[in-house]
Amino acid sequence: MTAAPLVNAWNEWDPLEEIIVGRADGAAFEPVEPGSRPQLRDGSGGPFPTGPKPDGMVEGANEELDNLAEVLKGYGVTVRRPEAHDYTTSVKTPTFEVSNQYCGVCPRDVLITIGNEIIEATMSRRARFFEYLPYRPLIYHYWNNDPQMVWTAAPKPSMADDMYREEFWDWPLEKRHAEMHNFEFCVTQDEVIFDAADMSRFGRDVIIQESMTTNRQGINWLRRHLEPKGLRVHTVHFPLDFFPSHIDCTFVPLRPGLILTNPDRPLREGEERLFLDNGWELMEAPTPSTDNHEMPLYCQSSKWLSMNVLSIAPDVVVCEEQEKPMHDLLEERGFEVVKVPFRKVYEYGGSLHCATWDVRRSGKAEDYFPNLKG
């Protein structure tokens, strides 16, 4: 008899069985580089910190990550953690150099499970080039113990100067309005670039956002890789988001037929038909409990981290404990809402979905878009 697979996840909501939760050990402040211009949230224009994150900041985030791990275990989920890693060291390759790396809090950005396959993303920023390394022992565990598991590492980009459009960061608002329908951001179109968190799984269908962290070459690579396996890849765009990065604060499937959407970032006109014609309801997220200017000082994400929820099952969702408007909406729609503290993790650029990577969910490759051909 063939052993039950260790790696199996086709969507974002099937009952969760095994997951990786990130860790903050060894984290550093994200450096200024062509793919990132971190700024303080207070609008002072002061210099962004460099070097290691303070011990108290690391300990606070780890407390919340550890608590999330325990909560998930209480729901019968197997939880694994990446190795500790020193992200404060510099990186130098033949094509780029960066003063330090970033952190291991957000495995969702680096890795995605699609069916029985684990895909390592290229990543889009120099400080995150080697961020896959702390997860390699876990991947080898699945590789050595699940003979059905497929492991794919996407082609690593050069991250050389000409891979970026550094003037992007200095464009005035008028220029952004003029360029927003071209979907040209800080990464050029020459090399294959994608972060795993720009993808969302819907059974046989994969939705990919074109963004600052995923370009058209990256989407083309994913399409050529996945479609021969019987999957269908769809590109989506959110033209009112001038700094789009990762889809899980913008467009979040909660269960079959229901997607949480960002009222500030609607789909490009016409793209909603893919969902509406196949019976999906697009439900607007409520205004977050925290405004942008009240977000943690070093957080580079928007207030819409309120949408960055984690599904344990089609009717059970984990939310940040202070996001009461989100709790109320989900409970009105029949969800059990599991509330956990996670504001200290916001400093690391993500929330509950970002800080996890689901490796196994029960279920199979269902067709949730029956009105598509092929």
Image (cartoon, rainbow, N blue to C red):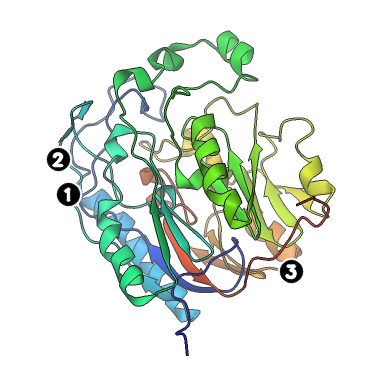
Which residue is label 1 attached to?
Answer: 86
First-in-chain label (1 vs 3): 1
Label 2 belongs to which residue? 89
Going from the N terminus, do you reach mark 3 or mark 2 first? 2
Residue type highlighted by circle 3:
Gly
For mark 1, does the 10 Å Cα neighbourhood hold few (<14), some (14 to 19), or many (20 or more) residues? Answer: some
Relative to residue 109, is residue 16 drawn left or right? right
Q: Amino acid at mark 1?
A: Asp
Task: Kindly identify which residue carries mark 3.
Answer: 334
Judge by depth and name the residue closer to the eye, 210 or 225.
Answer: 225
**Label 3: which secondary element:** loop
Q: Is residue 290 visible?
A: no
Mark 2: give few (<14), some (14-19) or many (20+) Cα within 10 Å: some
Camera-side residue of 160 and 239: 160
Circles 1 and 3: CB distance less than 8 Å? no
Q: Where on the picture, by quarter, is residue 32?
A: top left
Q: What residue is at 79 percent from the left and 50 percent from the top?
A: 372
Where residue 310 sits in the image (x, y, percent)?
54, 61
